Image: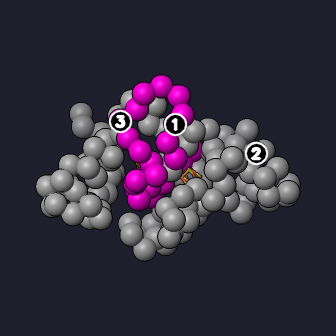
Amino acid sequence: MADTPTVNRSYYNCNDCPAYCCSIYERVQVTPRDVRRLAKHFGITEEEASSRYTKMYAKERVLRRKADPLFGQACQFLDPQTRGCTIYHARPAVCREYPDTIRCAYYDLLKFERNQQDDVNVVPLVKITFRNGK
Ligand code: SF4
Ligand code: SF4
């Protein structure tokens, strides 16, 4: 998230993206190991890191969010101007793995719409939620 992987070939460039993945997902999972990493990064206890930077969402521990000028809400660690991660080296594992494919659907959408609108700066606003389709 919010940076381009250096390994393998990929068809997206996070540096050219307003950080959809850091904004439109309500839940960014945080594991105990992630909490330890955050605690170390900020020089605080794991308990402090957990209560300051995470919350429970259903039965899952996730990162807290904050207001975002572009998408309404985003991860608390996203810089609203640069659209980069402010804790890049301490970000959770799920952020390191995302999108875990050679393509990013949001980047494809961004490129598609910028081409369609003939505007290199336009940002299509999308919202994603999930529902059991059965
Ligand atoms: S949405 Fe895709 S291109 Fe944009 S920052 Fe996330 S992984 Fe990178
Ligand atoms: S921790 Fe960083 S990479 Fe992960 S969602 Fe937040 S801003 Fe994005």
In the depicted view, which residue is nearer to us: 34 or 62? Answer: 34
Q: Which residues are magenta?
A: 3-29
Which residue is most to the left?
116
The kind of secondary structure element at disc 3 is: loop
**Residue 78 position within the rendered picture, expressed as x and y whole percent measured from the top left:** 55, 61
Q: Amino acid at mark 1?
A: Pro
Mark 2–mark 1 distance (CA, rounded to whole Å): 20 Å
Which is more foreground, mark 2 or mark 1?
A: 1
Res 11 label: 3
Would you say residue 92 is visible in this rendering?
yes
Mark 3–mark 1 distance (CA, rounded to whole Å): 10 Å
Mark 2–mark 3 distance (CA, rounded to whole Å): 29 Å
**Residue matched to label 2:** 37
In the depicted view, which residue is nearer to us: 108 or 20? Answer: 108
- Label 3: few (<14), some or many (≥20) within 10 Å? few
**Residue 118 position within the rendered picture, expressed as x and y whole percent measured from the top left:** 16, 60
The kind of secondary structure element at disc 1 is: loop
Q: Amino acid at mark 3?
A: Tyr
Which residue is most to the top?
8
**Residue 86 position within the rendered picture, expressed as x and y whole percent measured from the top left:** 63, 59
Q: Amino acid at mark 2?
A: Arg
Residue 105 falls in image quadrant: top left
**Residue 83 position within the rendered picture, expressed as x and y whole percent measured from the top left:** 49, 62
Confirm whether the magenta stretch covers residue 118: no
Res 5 label: 1
Above or below, 37 relative to 123: above
